[in-house]
Amino acid sequence: MSVTRQDFEDAIAAYWGAKQLQSEQSAIKAAVGAGTAGSVRGGKHFDVIAALLAKFFLEADYPAESIRVKKSQGLELPGYYRPQKQWDLVVVHKGVLVAAFEMKALGGPSYGNNYNNRVEEALGSAVDLRRAALADLYPKEKPWLGYFFIMQDGEGSRRPVKTAQGALPADDIWHGTSYQDRFGIFCERLMAEQLYDAACYVTSSAESPKPIELVESLDWRHFSAAINARLTYLKDLGLPG
């Protein structure tokens, strides 16, 4: 049974506490320990997203112990500019980094307070790991990185944000953009620079949890296709085995 669009929409709704997980998804959470992962991500909201992503790997016959979602399991991966970085979901099997995911969100009403932090986190994590791979710290297979981001939908995230009159002008692409627009541009550029292998960017809210996908290349369909492509690639190489 594949991971479906409905699974995705249910997980986003559950993220906002709008509905309970189905029994199957609850079982996945229990299998990989997602129910106790809240301390890692500053709250348990992302446990449902971790369960959603874990389902891809469980259904591809990766053992539950290869899917790490909580600190006690060891979420740290080697870096280059620093010794290690803790990711949000890590799949390691037979010494191969099958996948590593960052799962982050930006909420209101003060979207600007954490916007730069989210950008810097995503950039830093990927650049550090990619450089570590070049230094042969991931010798078996090229690492695969995924980024899942939820922007709280609201007037504050839809409204255009001014760019400061700085010492030099900003790229024209940013002028007249909202935080929702800016994060779409950011994720597109992460993908264009091959810092991440897949990115899913949605806006949603507790009042209207149905996910809005503003950029086609960053939607669930493309994201899930990229995960499945990774699984197929490794299957042809004998993994999980």
Image: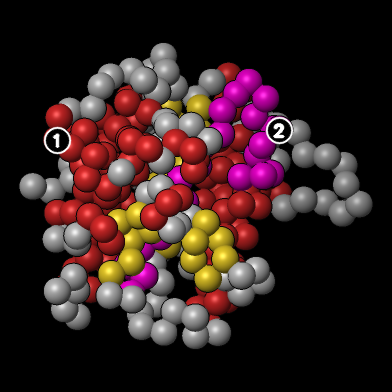
Front one among 56 and 149? 56
In the rendered structure, which disc, 1 or 2, sits on the residue that comes first in sequence? Answer: 1
Of the numbered discs in the image, which one, if any, rests on residue 158?
none
Residue 207, x across and y down, in percent: 41, 14
In magenta stretch: residue 234: no
User: In front: 90, or 128?
Assistant: 90
Residue under the point 37% across and 28% down: 15
Label at residue 24: 1
| x then y, percent, for residue 126 | 54, 63
Q: Which amino acid, mark 2?
A: Asn
Asked if residue 215 lies left or right of residue 189, the reply is left
Frontmost of labels 1 and 2 is: 1
Give the residue number, with chain letter if any, for mark 2.
Answer: 113
Q: Secondary structure at mark 2?
A: helix
The spot of residue 158 in percent (x, y) is 57, 26
Residue range in magenta is: 96-118
- Tell me which residue sits at (41%, 48%) in the image: 70
Residue positioned 36% across, 70% down in the render:
97
Dots 1, 2 in contact, CB < 8 A:
no
Q: Position of residue 181 (x, y in %)?
A: 56, 38
Quarter of the image containing the C terminus?
A: bottom left
Mark 1 Cα shell of 10 Å, populated few (<14), some (14-19), many (≥20): few
Residue that appears at 77% across and 50% down = 170
Q: Is residue 119 above or below residue 145?
A: above
Vertical placement of 34 versus 65: above or below? above
Residue 133 seen in this snapshot? yes
